Image: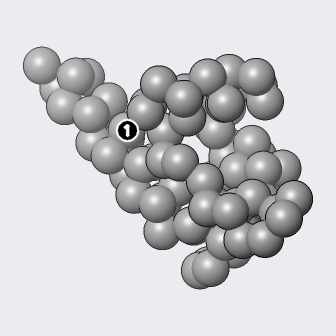
Amino acid sequence: MEKQTSELPSEGYARLPAVLAVVPWSRSTHWLKVKRGEFPAPVKLSVGVTAWRVSDVRNWIAKRDATRDSAVAA
């Protein structure tokens, strides 16, 4: 079962637990994908506060879904 993007706020920033609620992997895999450039990098909002732009996460999901759809159609 695919996780829903509706778990993300409609705009603004999302902290790691909210991002992990909509991607199909663990915390360690998430950071590996960020390091490899396979997932958008977070934004440092202040000391000890890291978050992702919701628009970046939603765009990544949309791009991934489009890639999957074209692979299934082929």
Q: Residue 67, image x and y in percent?
A: 27, 34
Q: Is residue 20 left or right of residue 42?
A: right
| Residue tagged 1 | 64
Q: Could you tell me which residue is drawn at 39 percent across and 57 percent down?
A: 59
Q: Residues within 10 Å of mark 1 (few under 14, many from 20)?
A: few
Q: Is residue 71 left or right of residue 18?
A: left
Q: Residue 19, image x and y in percent?
A: 70, 50
Quadrant including the C terminus: top left
Query: Which residue is at the far front?
Result: 47
User: Is 11 situated above or below 5?
Assistant: below
Query: Which residue is at the far left?
Result: 74
Identify the element where label 1 is drawn: helix
Q: Could you tell me which residue is drawn at 46 percent across and 60 percent down?
A: 56
Q: Residue 64, image x and y in percent?
A: 37, 38
Quadrant including the N terminus: top right
Q: Could you tell me which residue is drawn at 68 percent across and 62 percent down?
A: 44
Residues 21 and 14: in front is 14
Residue 7 in view, yes or no: no
Q: Amino acid at mark 1?
A: Arg
Query: Which residue is at the far bottom?
Result: 11
User: Is 14 situated above or below 66?
Assistant: below
Residues 30 and 71: in front is 30
Q: Residue 40, image x and y in percent?
A: 48, 47
Quadrant for residue 54, please give it.
bottom right
Residue 21 in view, yes or no: yes
